[in-house]
């Protein structure tokens, strides 16, 4: 609220073609995004833009979570994999996503498969590292007690290891979500014809300033909504952790 007020006052006091008042941006977005004509050249409705972007973002995040959980647990629990794969993980993670894009374009073209693949590779490593640290943080005494009582592997995974690593896993989810959203925008600015990233780039190239700022606000709204969803999931699942630290 305070940031929006500062934006509005600054734009009114120091008029600029490139920084319109927030009220004008919101008003323009409300009128432009409610255009339900599927043949519209640019004034597409907001559901069309968001569904195109989420159609890339959500599958990519799901794949990254699955890969990160499996590899993260394996690396944390199997010492030889830890020694062999940890340097590779850190090496690939250090390569910027912008440098990986040309490689994926050469291999997969410029379609949705390329975009989803780039998001997966960018998002999986921070999540995987948090899974590794979360599993490794489980005290050896806890593992030894489970062995003494002959707790089977499935019960150990779902009742001991996974709950114990959940605080780190949710930290990884938050970081992964932020990175995935950024990379989604990057990929939609390369050879795409829909999505919020394409919308922002299209507007910027044609000096449609109100549309550009409206797209930026929409990206912020998507990020905020994903954060709210994570909070709703985290509260019941980590209630024990919050009570323990209070």
Image (cartoon, rainbow, N blue to C red):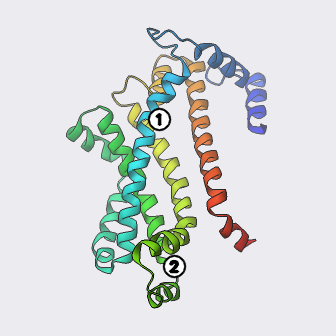
Rendering quarter of residue 23: top right
Instruction: Tell me: 206 left or right of 30.
Output: left
Residue at 60% x, 19% y: name it. 210
Measured as percent of width and height from the top left, residue 131 is found at 46, 66
For the N terminus, the image quarter is: top right
Measured as percent of width and height from the top left, residue 124 is found at 40, 55
Count of numbered labels shown in the rendering: 2
Residue at 55% x, 53% y: name it. 174
- Residue contact between numbered discs 1 and 2, judged by CB atoms under 8 Å: no
Measured as percent of width and height from the top left, residue 5 is found at 78, 32
Which element type, helix, strand or loop, lies under badge 2? loop
Instruction: Tell me: 116 left or right of 246.
Output: left
User: Can you tell which mark lies on residue 54?
Assistant: 1
For the C terminus, the image quarter is: bottom right
Image position of 189 with respect to 243: above or below: above
Rendering quarter of residue 225: top right
Nearest the eye: 50 or 85: 50
Label 1: few (<14), some or many (≥20) within 10 Å?
Answer: some
Image position of 192 with respect to 40: above or below: below
Nearest the eye: 172 or 241: 241
Image position of 59 with respect to 51: above or below: below
What residue did someone put label 2 on?
138
Nearest the eye: 142 or 112: 142
Q: Marks 1/2: CA distance?
A: 35 Å
Residue at 42% x, 51% y: name it. 123
User: Can you tell which mark lies on residue 201?
Assistant: none
Label 2: few (<14), some or many (≥20) within 10 Å?
Answer: some
**The furthest residue to the bottom:** 148
Instruction: Tell me: 223 left or right of 81.
Output: right
Which element type, helix, strand or loop, lies under badge 1? helix
């Amino acid at each position: 609220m305070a940031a929006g007020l500062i934006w509005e006052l600054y734009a009114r006091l120091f008029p600029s073609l490139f920084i319109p008042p927030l009220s004008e941006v919101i008003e323009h977005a409300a009128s432009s995004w409610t255009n339900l004509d599927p043949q519209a050249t640019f004034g597409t409705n907001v559901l069309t833009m968001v569904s195109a972007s989420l159609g890339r973002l959500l599958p990519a995040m799901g794949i990254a979570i699955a890969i990160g959980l499996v590899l993260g647990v394996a690396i944390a629990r199997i010492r030889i994999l830890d020694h062999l794969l940890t340097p590779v993980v850190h090496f690939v993670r250090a390569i910027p996503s912008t440098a990986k894009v040309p490689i994926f374009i050469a291999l997969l073209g410029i379609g949705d498969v390329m975009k989803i693949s780039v998001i997966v590779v960018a998002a999986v490593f921070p999540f995987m590292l948090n899974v590794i640290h979360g599993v490794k943080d489980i005290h050896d005494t806890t593992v030894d007690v489970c062995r003494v009582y002959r707790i089977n592997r499935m019960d150990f995974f779902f009742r001991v290891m996974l709950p114990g690593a959940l605080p780190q896993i949710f930290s990884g989810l938050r970081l992964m979500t932020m990175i995935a959203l950024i990379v989604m925008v990057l990929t939609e600015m390369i050879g795409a014809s829909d999505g919020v990233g394409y919308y922002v780039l299209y507007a910027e190239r044609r000096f449609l300033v109100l549309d550009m700022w409206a797209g930026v606000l929409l990206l912020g709204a998507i990020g905020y909504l994903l954060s709210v969803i994570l909070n709703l999931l985290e509260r019941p699942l980590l209630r024990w952790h919050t009570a323990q630290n209070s």
